[in-house]
Amino acid sequence: MRHFRLLVVGNGVSAYGSYLNMVALNVFIYEVTDSALAAGLFMAVRLMTSVVSGFVSGRLVSAYDRKRLMVGADLTQCVAMVALLIAPAGGRAGLLYVLAVVTGFCSTLSGVALRSSIPEIVGAELRVRANSLLATGRSLAMIAGFASAGVVVAQLGYVAAISLDAASFAVSASVLMSLPIRTKAAKRVGGVGGEGSAEDREARGGKRARLGGLVLLRAAPVLAVMIAVRAADGLGSSSHNVALPVYSSALDPSHPATFVSQFWATWAIGNIVMQQLCGRLAGRGGRQGPGERAFAIGACVMSAAFIVVFAGLPTGVAVAAALVAGMADGLTEIAYVSRLQAAPDEQRGRLFGLSASVENTGFGLGMLVSGALLDRFTPLQVVGLLHGLAIALCLGMFVVLVRYGRRGGRAGPVAAERHVPSVESEAR
């Protein structure tokens, strides 16, 4: 885990720069173009690129070295940021949309590659703990990035903010290049237990890798339902993201940012606490961490808690609900990622690529639907509708789990559990 902790630091630094620029670039675009439509178009281009690149990323991480892909993605984003800085002022408007495509594609590719690689980097038995560390690092980066964005832009300007983002990608790439990690399963030699020769196994693995994510899920109904729930979570997440400023302004028109700040700060605390708890519990007694039922329960609780936040209850109760939502969100994230990582290496990249596309589609569609509905309905009604859909799908997932009589076993050809030795254990 020593090498992986360094990777977490590098990934956290990169995430900090991304969250910082998520705020800075939106304001910068508006200042350069003097158009709210242009700013919205930038976000739409980036999101659509992320949706499409999920499928492409799944193919790339199945076919090529994942470490090189992650390094290349970081360096490409670094170069894109530098190009924006040195471009003439008159040419920056068009370059911004190129940047949206580059960052949307590279961030998705890097995320799919890293999540697919974790069982090979630390070993399957430590993947839950590794996911906990990675998620905590990104959560802390999100808090730091959002919190410092206003200060950096106001005090140092856009050039400093964009330079920090470029530097963060350079740091992440440098850390990755320096680490002696393996990101793909090693090829075994010789036949074992009637499995055939190494060439036969490689041919079978290649055939499975060429299967599309939808074909894999047809034989793995529980995974299919889990990914559908994540899409519904994307819808729900977009609803409370869009509705939160509206609700906060109605609570206190003179200080509209107060409740928003309280909400996200409390949510982040709950999220980090649960991520750490999952990691620590998984590290005891060889436990594999939360399973599919925990994922379904967590998703139900998370959606219900978000609905309570907008129910018009006293602020203390709403903040407590935000804490519960953050904890449930942390639980579902760890359970979901760890479950997908239980698939064989040659299938894992396709699953994470499909998942990225589905989640981004749900979030993007939810942004459009929520914005349109809030013109006619209250925040509680909008959030209740979209998060209610996630709850309904979770109940459907319980039916699937009961039908297949499983807690965390197999679902068709996608293996639910297998031991993958870590690189460091082999070195020892």
Image: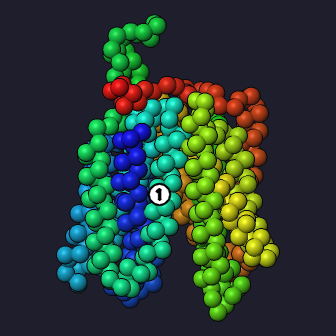
Q: Residue at (29%, 50%) from the top-left corner?
A: 175
Task: Residue 359 in the image: state x and y as whole percent.
Answer: 54, 54
Q: Quadrant of residue 289?
A: top right
Residue 270, can we see it?
yes
Q: Is residue 279 left or right of residue 39?
A: right
Q: Look at the image and tell me in which quarter the N terminus lies.
A: top left
Q: List the single residue furthest toward the top.
A: 194
**What colouring style does the render use?**
rainbow
Q: Look at the image and tell me in which quarter the C terminus lies.
A: top left
Q: Quadrant of residue 100?
A: bottom left
Q: Residue at (66%, 85%) from the top-left corner?
A: 249
Q: Quadrant of residue 238?
A: bottom right
Give the answer, above or below, for where 243 lies relative to 52. below
Q: Is residue 409 left or right of residue 58?
A: right
**Relative depth, front residue between 98 and 159:** 159
Task: Residue 137 in the image: state x and y as whole percent.
Answer: 47, 55
Q: Residue at (59%, 34%) from the top-left corner?
A: 284
Q: List the single residue furthest toward the bottom.
A: 254
| Local crowd size for mark 1, using a 10 Å CA cut-off: few (<14), some (14–19), many (≥20) | many
Instruction: Return the residue at label 1.
Output: 138
Give the answer, above or below, for where 168 lies relative to 122. below
Task: Residue 61 in the image: state x and y as whole percent.
Answer: 36, 41
Q: Helix or strand or loop: what does disc 1 sit on?
A: helix
Residue 117, can we see it?
no
Q: Amino acid at mark 1?
A: Arg
Give the answer, above or below, for where 268 lies relative to 59. below
Q: Residue at (20%, 76%) from the top-left corner?
A: 87
User: Could you tell me how many numbered marks the image carries?
Assistant: 1
Task: Residue 93 in the image: state x and y as whole percent.
Answer: 30, 79
